[in-house]
Image (cartoon, helix red, strand yellow):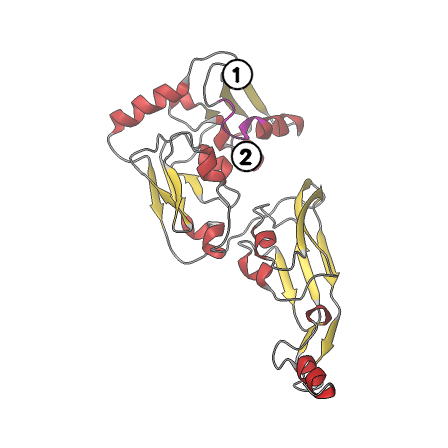
Amino acid sequence: MKIYADFSRCVRSFWKASRCSKCVEACPAGALYVGDGRVEVAEDLCVGCGICIGACPTGVYTPAEELGPRISCREGGPCIHALRFEDYVKLVEKYGEVEVDARCDDCKLRDAGGGWRALEEALKAGLRVKVVRGRGGDVSRRLLFRRAAAGDPSIKAVRGPPRRFEYSRPLGAEGLRPVVDVDRCVLCGVCAGVCPTEAVKVDEESGLVTVDGGRCVECGVCVEACDVGALRLERGEVDVEHYLVEVVQCPNCGTIYAKNRGECPVCGFTTKLIKELYGL
């Protein structure tokens, strides 16, 4: 299977200090690695299994060709670990019913990703997904031989400036979503700046922080970027939540800022006042 990788969607392009390496850890061929703070691709090693597609939370990797109603890695399609729950939803909406070749009992890639969990979620949700189970041999060796015979790279990677994208899931569904600790938040806005889907928005003047759980892709980059530890990911019902952080206005320059900062971020008025009062 041919794979297209758009690294403008990678969380590392939004936050250089991000430690996300989910695709690297999932790749069974070692075709992905982290170099100089970003994910790099060794095109000659990629076997086109597509496991990176399911591992990446922000959709960096996508199939270069359209998926059909039958998913089988034995027939040149993606590995079962390439599919997420939302992929099954889209395929069923398009074709009415999907058949999945899950004869993975003897395959070395059986536990390489979260594909089984996504498949079980699809079945639990009542989607029309027909599953063929059992033993079908080790597919990983076939992929290696298929890659060698192809003669051209199975993955094409492009880069560019960070690009936000649309994402949505039903409100009220179960999942991870950012939770804000208002006693720690200083309204710096970094979390909103690094979020690839604008799931977090910060209004510094009103002190309002809005978290749209339906937009969250559970990448965790906002948590990593928060220096004061005011964000965490929690599992529960996905919803739109509003948090109000107490703000004050600097009597010296008029800047409105979070009370948690302790002093005006523009002129440092509090520090100056203390020095004057105590003759420092």
Q: What residue is drawn where x is 73% and y is 76%?
A: 248
In the displayed structure, does residue 225 sit left or right of residue 67?
Answer: right
**Residue type at numbered disc 2:** Arg
- Please provide the residue range marked out in magenta: 110-116
Q: Is residue 162 above or below residue 255?
A: above
Front position in the image: 182 or 275: 275
Q: Is residue 59 above or below residue 162?
A: above
Q: Which callout, 1 or 2, points to the residue nearer the camera?
A: 2
Number of other residues with Cα within 10 Å of mark 1, as a class: few under 14, some 14 to 19, many 20 or more: few
Q: What residue is drawn where x is 59% and y is 45%?
A: 218
Q: Quadrant of the C terminus?
A: bottom right
Q: Which residue is mark 1?
A: 132
In the displayed structure, does residue 39 sit left or right of residue 192?
Answer: left
Q: Main secondary structure of the magenta part?
A: loop
Q: Residue 84 got which mark?
A: 2
The mark tally for this picture is: 2
Q: Position of residue 81 (x, y in %)?
A: 50, 29
Q: What residue is drawn where x is 35% and y is 30%?
A: 47
**Residue type at numbered disc 1:** Val
Q: Position of residue 38 (x, y in %)?
A: 41, 49
Q: Position of residue 59 (x, y in %)?
A: 48, 44
SS class, disc 2: loop
Measure the C-alpha gap from mark 1 to mark 2.
18 Å
Q: Is residue 104 above or below residue 97?
A: above
Q: Is residue 104 above or below residue 240?
A: above
Q: Position of residue 116 (x, y in %)?
A: 56, 26
Q: What residue is drawn where x is 49% and y is 54%?
A: 17
Q: Residue 93 got which mark?
A: none
Q: Quadrant of the N terminus?
A: top left
Quarter of the image holding residue 33?
top left
SS class, disc 1: strand
